[in-house]
Image: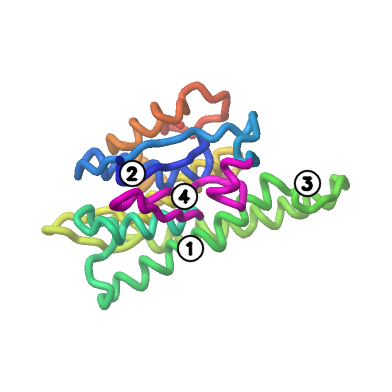
Amino acid sequence: MPEYTLYFHSGSASMIPHWILIELALTHGIDYETEYVSFTAKDQKSEKYLALNPKGVVPTLILHGDNGAKEIITESAATALLLAARHPEAHLAPSDPRSFQYPKYLETVIYLANTVSPSMRDWFYADKDSGSSDPTSIETIKAMARKRIGAAWDLLEKQLEGQPYLVENIVDGIPQPTAADYMFVILARWSRYFEEHALKWKNLKALVLRMTEREGWQVLRENERLYNRDDPTWPDVPV
């Protein structure tokens, strides 16, 4: 029995735990399996899937224990925080919760989850979530979302000034990324649909390039078949 089972859909928020699981497998040998959730087939609304995740969304992460015991966790930020906490050997979070770095780590993860991610949804699903067919109303929602996202990029750009990752996390003298950096790259990837995409910010682009050089990113792209997606691409970065 693997330690984890991840239910995912390509290119969605489930990329966050998927990427982290890949990194954990590559560097620390953890065992996991994946189950693909087809939105085209509406797998996420099936009776079987809703029994695991009544929200009908991805990700769903199952933690397998002894004697068939299991626990289920959803929400991409929660899975990232959990995996970082369960695998301290991977240094996905500052090691000491009493340090000054740890509060910044939590703040950054929650900011990405509570501000950036909902703003992205407002842009992508302005018509669906608002229930409006009025083009002016829909564009107003999208414009507000773009404004919030731009403000987020400004804030994170300043946070990165003088350091390679969003949160200071030094291990044996070497800066290491935290779960916040994995989250950011996935959210920033979605901004490739915007004129003001994240790579127009110098420090954000440097972070994206640094993170996408990791072996785990290449494995993630292969596993989720992102190279086959007919999407706009970032400059300089494989989607």
**Residue farthest along the front direction in this orientation:** 67
Give the residue number, with chain letter if any, for mark 2: 21
Q: Nearer the viewer, mark 2 or mark 3?
A: 2
Can you give x and y, in whole percent of width and height, for residue 4 in the image? Answer: 35, 45
Which stretch appears magenta?
A: 47-74
Q: Secondary structure at mark 4?
A: loop
Can you give x and y, in whole percent of width and height, for residue 125 in the image? Answer: 70, 46
Q: Is residue 65 left or right of residue 29?
A: right
- C-alpha span from label 3 to label 1: 28 Å
Q: Secondary structure at mark 3?
A: helix
Q: Nearer the viewer, mark 4 or mark 2?
A: 2
Can you give x and y, in whole percent of width and height, for residue 70 in the image? Answer: 39, 53
| Residue occupying the point 37% across, 51% down | 63
If the image is split into quadrants, where does the N terminus sit? top left
- C-alpha span from label 4 to label 2: 28 Å
Give the residue number, with chain letter if any, for mark 4: 201
Reply above or below: 9 against 131: above
Give the residue number, with chain letter if any, for mark 1: 155
- C-alpha span from label 1 to label 2: 28 Å
Residue 72 in magenta stretch:
yes
Q: Is residue 47 left or right of residue 190?
A: right
- C-alpha span from label 1 to label 4: 11 Å
Reply above or below: 15 against 140: above
Give the residue number, with chain letter if any, for mark 3: 127
Q: Quadrant of residue 210?
A: top left
Q: Secondary structure at mark 1?
A: helix
